[in-house]
């Protein structure tokens, strides 16, 4: 493990020192594309098993310190040993950079935004036994870009999502699995950790 | 006949290698495609799988490239297979350390697998093919031995789970060793 970390650090440092890697901060109008991997934790009264997912996003920067991220991702997780859940998010966040320092390699930020979620619970041994629902959420978090060149960065971020919508309550009694859609508004918590790679492809204004 | 073909290829490779000794092929605008085989080692199962792999890579800068990979499961070396079908589709970025004709790189690639495990003998559950999120970390060495061709050798670790088996998820993490031949062209010239 230590060897892998050393190799990764070597690659990173070599890349940083090998060329003019100091990025501009005046990226107003910058448009970038990115791919992301996500780890998610859900709390529906109690913490469920961690989810793992893949997604993509684009960023459109409004000013030197304000960026926006428009994303879609798809995560899957186990429901104990009798079912599984799939979360699909489509949303957007505003990013505010904490530092106005010129040409930073590390750019920390806070973010806040909104998203829609499509959630589906499915029984393991009978995929025709499922329940689904749409919900809306608000999210906030923090993260940082690691700007390796003027155009390329990888980013780490953590965000908390508060979902507002009906709940699906799974149960498994005596080997019989059922999913119940509750009525009225419900709340559940979602914590997401993202690793993404991004490339600025255009300067729109 | 086969010997003659191999001899002709070896001669061509050697000639191009000598003729282009001082060429620097790894630069911004390089478009590359590699083809090869993956030998996979599943970490949670006794299964050593073989895949055929292809990728397309574009160097947006000398040290940065973007790459899409597709791997197709062929078979396992064991008597009983874990997988019936498995297709890996990954997209990500690589950091490069070019040095003459050699290029060391490391990259990460989020993606999806389209996976179908074999029929479970105990429960007789017939698994459907499902799209599952995946993540790969790769380390690769390329030797650009001519103006248009390169050899590659790479290792990568794939994180993947199949959800929906009767006992929960099936851990399909796999370590790969890959090798093969690549072609490359300078797609865009630097301004």
Image (spheres, coloured by chain):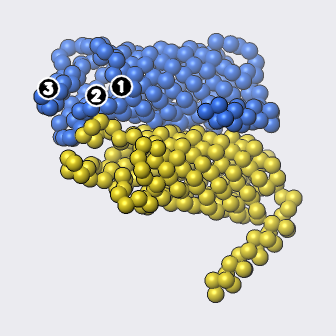
At a point 74% along the width and 27% down the height, the residue shown is A23
Check the residue under mark 2 and report the chain it is in. A
Residue A34 at what x, y percent from top left?
56, 35
SS for dot 3: strand
Q: Nearer the viewer, residue B189 or B124?
A: B124
Q: Which residue is mark 3?
A: A173
Chain B display color? yellow
Q: Which residue is mark 2?
A: A80
Q: Quadrant of the N terminus of chain A?
A: top right
Check the residue under mark 3 and report the chain it is in. A
- Taking the image as shown, residue A105 lies to the left or right of residue B159, namely right
Q: Counting other residues with Cα less than 10 Å from the Cα at mark 3, is it few (<14), some (14-19), or many (20 or more)?
A: few
Check the residue under mark 1 and report the chain it is in. A
Q: Nearer the viewer, residue B20 or B167?
A: B167
Q: Return the disc, 1 or 2, that comes first in the chain's sequence.
A: 1
- Colour-to-chain, blue: A
| Label 1 close to label 2 by CB (< 8 Å) | yes
Residue A120 at what x, y percent from top left?
27, 31
At a point 50% along the width and 52% down the height, the residue shown is B40
At a point 74% along the width and 58% down the height, the residue shown is B144
Residue B90 at what x, y percent from top left?
51, 46
SS for dot 1: loop
């Amino acid at each position: 493990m230590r060897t892998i970390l050393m190799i990764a650090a070597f690659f990173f440092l070599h890349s940083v020192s090998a060329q003019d890697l100091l990025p501009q901060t005046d990226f107003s109008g910058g448009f970038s594309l990115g791919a992301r991997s996500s780890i998610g934790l859900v709390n529906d009264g109690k913490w469920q098993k961690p989810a793992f997912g893949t997604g993509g996003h684009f960023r459109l920067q409004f000013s030197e310190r304000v960026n926006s991220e428009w994303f879609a991702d798809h995560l899957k997780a186990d429901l104990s040993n009798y079912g599984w859940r799939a979360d699909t998010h489509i949303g957007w966040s505003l990013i505010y950079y904490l530092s106005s320092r010129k040409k930073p390699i590390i750019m920390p930020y806070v973010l806040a935004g909104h998203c829609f979620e499509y959630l589906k619970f499915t029984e393991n041994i009978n995929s025709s036994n499922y329940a689904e629902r749409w919900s809306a959420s608000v999210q906030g978090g923090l993260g940082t870009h690691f700007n390796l060149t003027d155009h390329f960065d990888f980013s780490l971020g953590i965000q908390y999502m508060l979902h507002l919508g009906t709940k699906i309550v799974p149960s498994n009694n005596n080997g019989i699995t059922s999913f119940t859609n509750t009525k009225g508004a419900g709340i559940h918590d979602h914590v997401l950790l993202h690793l993404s790679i991004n490339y600025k492809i255009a300067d729109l204004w | 006949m086969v010997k003659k073909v191999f001899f002709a290829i070896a001669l061509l490779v050697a000639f191009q290698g000598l003729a282009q000794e001082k060429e620097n092929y790894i630069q911004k605008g390089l478009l590359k495609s590699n083809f090869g085989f993956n030998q996979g080692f599943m970490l949670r199962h006794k299964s050593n799988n073989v895949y055929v792999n292809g990728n397309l890579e574009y160097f947006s800068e000398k040290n940065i490239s973007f790459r899409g990979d597709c791997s197709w499961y062929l078979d396992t070396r064991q008597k009983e297979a874990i997988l019936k079908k498995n297709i890996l589709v990954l997209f990500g970025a690589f950091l490069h350390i070019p040095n003459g004709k050699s290029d060391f790189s490391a990259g990460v690639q989020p993606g999806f697998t389209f996976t179908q495990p074999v029929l479970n003998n105990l429960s007789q559950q017939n698994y459907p093919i499902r799209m599952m999120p995946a993540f790969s970390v790769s380390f690769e060495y390329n030797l650009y031995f001519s103006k248009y061709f390169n050899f590659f050798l790479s290792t990568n670790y794939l994180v993947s789970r199949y959800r929906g088996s009767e006992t929960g998820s099936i851990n399909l993490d796999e370590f790969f060793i890959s090798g093969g031949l690549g072609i490359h062209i300078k797609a865009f010239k630097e301004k």
